[in-house]
Image (cartoon, coloured by chain):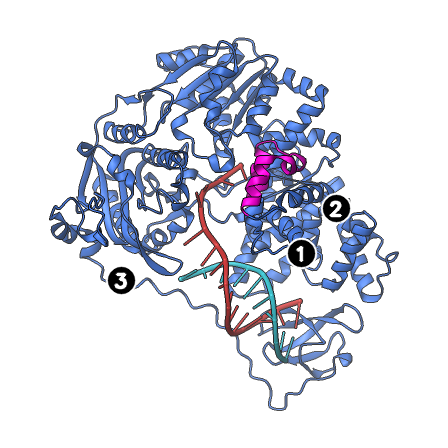
Chain colours: A blue, B red, C cyan
Amino acid sequence: MNPNYLDELNERQREAVAHINGPLMIVAGAGSGKTKVLTTRIAHLMRNGVDSFNILALTFTNKAAREMKERVEKILGGSEARNLYIGTFHSVFARLLRAEAHRLGYPNDFTIYDTDDAKSVIKTIINEQNLDDKHYKPNFVYNRISAAKNSLMGPEEYQHDYYVQQEDMRGNRPMIGKIYEMYAKRCFKNGAMDFDDLLFKMYILLKQFPEVLHKYQHKFKYIMIDEYQDTNPAQYEIIKLLGAVHENICVVGDDAQSIYSFRGATIQNILQFEKDYEDVRVVKLEQNYRSTKSILNVANEVIAHNKGQIEKALWTNNMEGEKIKLVRTMTDNEEGKHVADTIAEQKLRNHYENRDFAILYRTNAQSRSFEESLRRKAIPYRIYGGISFYQRKEIKDFLAYLRITINTRDEESLKRIINYPVRGIGKTTIEKAVIYSNEHNITFWEVLERAREFGFKGGTLEAIDGFVTMIRSFQAIMDKHNAYDVAVQVGKSTNIVKELFNDKTTEGLARYENIQELLNSIKEFTETPTEDGELLDKSLGSYLQQITLLTDADQGDDENSDVVKLMTIHAAKGLEFPVVFSVGLEENLFPSTLSINTREELEEERRLFYVAITRAKSRLWLTYANSRYRFGSLVQNEPSRFLEEMPEQFIDRSYAGGGAMRNTFGGGGGLWNNGGGNNMFDRMQKKTPAAAASPAARPAPKPASAPASTHVPSPGFAPDDPALMETGMEVEHQKFGFGTILSMEGAPNNRIATVVFPKGGGEKKIMLNYARLMIVKK
DNA sequence: GGGGTCACATATGAG
DNA sequence: ATGTGACCCC
């Protein structure tokens, strides 16, 4: 380690790094070298005799954790760094829970449910309870439950909390407490925890088992928390418990960047930190190393509109830089076009590369117009966020096999795949099994294991037994081999890989590629050394545990790819880019209609805008459109109120036609007459590139979906009796054409044939009772 | 089972 | 505009 590492820091940074014992709060403004301070501090602790095993550092994103790990490794070397506990709240707690789960009655290889899994369970319960899912929307119920857990409120407390009950009564949803209770029971029965449980159960574990608390209090003598302004009450209490003995808690945060209240975060945690502990040392990092003076001045003035902040003054030695460019366009499509044009122009003029640009928006749905315009100009880009790879159906299906192999209690996964690929276990069978499992208070899986005992017969029994045998064979592999070996076998035994390979439609091809990508990533997992302390555990269990906690943003972000980045502002927190486009600055969109009802909500939107501005290093564009498509119809929006909060001298409005001023007269339809009476608009419109050149206003036509191979039935086509069909026969189908029966399954009176149609899309499962097949050759 | 049609809701943000 | 869930047919 460079012995002069302290010299590379400014005075404030050094003060923070050098503080070893006792509570410390680092108020770190945007771009003030926060990560550098955190990593250097870890090195400094160790240099002063702290054992690497005793340090815990918690972040919010995998990305932040990875960056911290890498930088600490660079300072310390890999072997020492490996002992540190650095990770996200969720992943670290998942790991600790995995070690202690048995105390809570959970299997150690418990399954982690993502949001979709959780909502699916909730939906099942709502239906079981015969509640109207239009009124009890799974999404809404999920959010209530999530909020409860984040405030450490269990089902009991929820149902007895006066205030909460009042709220549910007002919305006429008195059953949410009951649903919560059943949901918690179901998750427990399934051996599953959702994201919020990783915090909630962690708290319960520490609270109920003093010996566990004691153990970790003494293990983690030094605790560091990144993005402290985004912690929720559950995280807050856990930190408090863990740090209670040594009080060596170092929190780093910026109240101006608190943007996660929807996840239960309370800005109060950081505002109150000084009152939580005795003798809190507060260090403020106020020098910004990232942005130009123009950018920083605009950011500072915007955020000054919020009340009740920790007092600080962010400044920079960087040069003044260009003014912030404000752009108005007519529609969202023109907005996209303008941004793409500007990127092309800036690449030429200022020698930027694609990777220097980021387009930041308020909602994921806004990405579309930018994708189109970038594609049309052949500018490579990548979208972060949105539907994650792991949420794709085929991926979830495949993972469900792996999950079941690890944890047979997981009914959610079991139901997903019990009849995928089709094996003749239909709705009736599943419903029966659910009833038996409830009656005998055993798991769904146990019903399947004892299928004969429960009276399943014939083809159904055969199918169930076959399924059970197959899963057991996976378990046998799992006991001796790594995650990849199991996955390969799953692909083979279930026929999923082959089936997708034979599907030659565009979607089928994409699905096949996704599965291949999944298999590759599992392979990669087993072949690269694990970074976090859990050394070289390449088991299936270890793989599954981390996979659910990955986000799209964590996927192969290779530094070499030269692409424009598109993401939400939330996803951009903690990142920086030479050139930023903050787009869609319109009322109803940013600030969002859903977040302007209270001062707190509006202030959070403003902080979000602040985050957007402060991502930019040297150039910043702010854009908005007069009208945009929403739900297929055009809606008009006024410019965002935030645009009025910026200091004029740092803003270049020449592309905005003065339209940034809101209509102060309150007259209807003022969009075209506003701007405080200036007549710039007509002149400026002509200068707008978007208005000047649009030779091809039509979007490129979408590629026609793969032409379905249309089969014309033979002249004398007449379906034959299903009872006559046997394996090996050649048959004709009205649509799929000629094919050969490969195999048969299912009960005698409900047989399912696997038929390969060389010209009709490969292998198909055909239910003989319904499909009309003609025997061509026996 | 699977493919088609139609109605309908749907979209803040994310581990 | 796009995705889904219910419903119907073969």
Counting from the top left corner in percent of width and height, residue A359 is at 34, 43
Q: Amino acid at mark 2?
A: Thr
The residue singled out by tag 2 in the image is A408
| Marks 2/3: CA–CA distance | 55 Å
Q: Is residue A187 visible?
A: yes
Would you say the magenta stretch is mainly helix, strand or loop? helix
- The residue located at (41%, 23%) in the rendering is A34
Choose mark 3 or mark 1, whichever is in front: 1
Mark 3 neighbour class, 10 Å CA radius: few under 14, some 14 to 19, many 20 or more:
few
Disc 1 chain ID:
A
Disc 1 residue type (three-letter) = Asn
Q: Is residue A342 above or below residue A107?
A: below
Q: CA distance from mark 3 to mark 1?
A: 51 Å
Amino acid type at image mark 3: Ala
Q: Is residue A730 above or below residue A394?
A: below
**Chain letter of the residue carrying label 2:** A
Query: If the image is split into quadrants, where does the C terminus of chain A sit?
Result: bottom right
Specify the segment rendered in magenta: A143-171
**How far across and how far down the image is residue A21, in percent?**
52, 9
* Magenta span contains residue A453: no
Camera-side residue of A69 and A209? A209
Number of the label disc, if any, that sits on residue A582: none
Dots 3 and 1: beta carbons under 8 Å? no
Secondary structure beneath label 2: loop
Which residue does the numbered mark 3 point to in the structure image?
A697
Earlier sequence position, callout 1 versus callout 2 = 1
Task: Categorize mark 2 by other alpha carbons within 10 Å: few (<14), some (14-19), many (20+).
Answer: many
**Viewer-closest of A193 and A617:** A193
Residue at (17%, 32%) from the top-left corner? Answer: A649
Q: Secondary structure at mark 3?
A: loop
Please give the residue where the numbered disc 1 appears in the rendered image. A130
